[in-house]
Image (spheres, grey):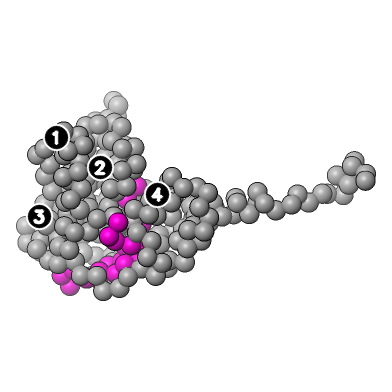
Amino acid sequence: MQILSVNVSMGREISYMGKSLKTGIFKEPVNGRVMLRRLSLDGDAQSDLVNHGGIFKAAYVYSVENYEFWQHELHRDGFAFGQFGENFTVRGMLEDEVSIGDVFRSGSAKMVVTQPRVPCYKLGIKMGLAEFPKMFLQSGRVGFMLRVIEEGEVGAGDPFERVETGPQKITVRAINHLLYFDPDNLEDAQRALRIPALSPGWRGSFEKRLAEARQRVEPQKLTVEDEKCCPP
């Protein structure tokens, strides 16, 4: 497991459906070492702080093996590092090999995996394919987000060393499938909630699912007025 490229962007103004918007998805490789801080890499900015960024999404990781998959799937080549908006293009860290809660060291930084990447329409813009976010999600090849435990410098060539395995061993691919494609799997939803590193957004989604399931199975309670209208 190794970093092949560190990619950043301070944001770019683009035109979309007749409107101007700013996005940080057009990331480019940087030379030398970069400081990974609590909220982001130096030189990197998230333009949409409602849906991106924050301590649980300080950096985004995507595997070069997925590049090869998409080149074949889309009949395209010429992808450059940062193609999918990732901060770290890596080797050997596919979604079925990394679990939520896994802790890694790279360079002098220490990080924990918090959630899969949730694609938005801006990924479709970057790929020149409006339907790509849906394809991306369905593929399970979504990469993952990191929270920074210890700030430090990172750079291309640094190994990603796993120093701790997530407590429930739920892989990135498995939890992505669980949230979006397996709504009746309440047992694994409960398991996911036992992962301390899980991001608040994903935690809230599973909590809501379980709460709704409990409401469906609880017997209906009659009010006093109901009882008057419906005698035995």
Q: Residue at x 30, y 32 (%)?
A: 131
The answer to whether residue 44 is seen in the rendering is no
Is mark 2 in CB contact (under 8 Å) with mark 3? Answer: no
Q: Amino acid at mark 3?
A: Val
The dot on residue 76 is: 1
Q: Residue at x 88, y 47 (%)?
A: 227
Rounded to the nearest whole Å, what is the CA distance between mark 2 and mark 3?
18 Å
Residue type, mark 4 in image: His
- Position of residue 45 measured from the top left corner of the image (x, y, whole percent): 24, 52
State the quadrant of the N terminus: bottom left
Q: Does the magenta portion include 105?
A: yes
Q: Pointer 2 and pointer 1: residues touching (CB < 8 Å)?
A: no
Write the start and end of the magenta stretch as one range: 96-119
Instruction: Tell me the amino acid under the disc marked 2.
Output: Thr
**First along the sequence among labels 1 and 3:** 3
Q: Nearer the viewer, residue 191 or 205?
A: 191
Residue name at image x 50 percent, y 52 percent = 185
Query: Answer yes or no: do the residues labelled 1 and 4 have beta carbons within 8 Å?
Result: no
Q: Which residue is mark 2?
A: 23
Q: Residues within 10 Å of mark 1 (few under 14, many from 20)?
A: few
Mark 4: which secondary structure?
helix
Q: Are marks 1 and 3 in contact (CB under 8 Å)?
A: no
Q: Earlier in the sequence, mark 2 or mark 4?
A: 2
**What residue does disc 3 label?**
30
Say which of marks 1 and 3 sits in front.
Answer: 1
- The label shown at residue 177 is 4
108 relative to 28, above or below: below
- Residue at 33% x, 62% y is 99
**Quick one: label 4 or label 3, which is nearer the N terminus?**
3
Q: Secondary structure at mark 1?
A: loop
Q: CA distance from mark 4 to mark 3?
A: 33 Å
